Image (spheres, helix red, strand yellow):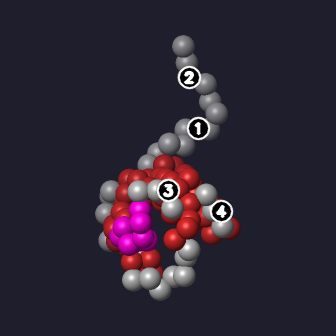
Amino acid sequence: MAGLTLGFMPIPTEWIEGSVFTSYVWPGVILGVVVGGSQALALAAQYGRYRLAAGLHAAAGPIMMIWIFVEIAIMLVWSPLHGIYFATGLVQTTLAVLALGAWPHPFLTRNSR
């Protein structure tokens, strides 16, 4: 967030030409508050051992994946970090949904008619 909003990161502004953004300030704020905030909230709930931690992780993962998807769609630039962050969000979401009880018990059994 700080790198984008304060200009520490030398990212060409040509990458966001044609989008609604004229600089990286608002993308940095959105990244820090929405994406980083949801991750921080999920992590705080996890460390605090709150019951809603898995649900917060199940929400924070898709937020990160959507951010990566939209970022690539706007910038039309791909980096290996995009793949790493998307995969991290996918793993986070999968583990959170499993922690919420999405795994069938016993696995692959049929329901009686």
Question: Which residue is at 51% across, 61% downward?
Answer: 17
- Is residue 56 found left or right of 13 in the rendered image? left
Query: Considering the numbered disc 4 on the image, is that residue within a helix, a strand or a loop?
Result: loop
- The residue segment tinted magenta is 21-29
Disc 1 versus disc 4: distance between alpha carbons? 41 Å
> Which residue lies under the disc numbered 2?
111
* Residue indicated by mark 4: 78
Q: Position of residue 44 (x, y in %)?
A: 34, 71
Task: Tell me the CA gap for discs 4 and 2.
Answer: 44 Å
The answer for how far apart the CA atoms under marks 4 and 3 are is 17 Å
Secondary structure under badge 2?
loop
Measured as percent of width and height from the top left, residue 78 is found at 65, 62
Q: Secondary structure at mark 3?
A: loop
Q: Which of 62 and 29 lies nearest the eye of the viewer?
A: 29
Decide which of 97, 101 is in the foreground and name it.
Answer: 97
Query: Which-is-in-front pick, marks 3 and 1?
Result: 3
Q: Pick whichever of labels 2 and 1 is earlier in the sequence.
A: 1
Closer mark to the observer between disc 4 and disc 3: 3
Where in the figure is residue 55, as x and y percent of width and height?
38, 53
Which tag, 3 or 1, sits closer to the chain's start? 3
Q: What's under tag 2, amino acid-wise?
A: Asn
Please report whichever mark, 4 or 3, sits nearer to the chain's N-terminal start. 3
Q: Indicate which disc, 2 or 3, sits on the residue closer to the N terminus.
A: 3
Amino acid type indicated by mark 3: Gly
Judge depth for marks 1 and 4 and give the one in front: 4
Q: Quadrant of the N terminus?
A: bottom left
Above or below, 13 against 21 in this view is below
Residue 15 appears in the figure: yes
| Residue kind at label 4, given as amino acid type | Trp
Residue 18, labelled with which disc?
3
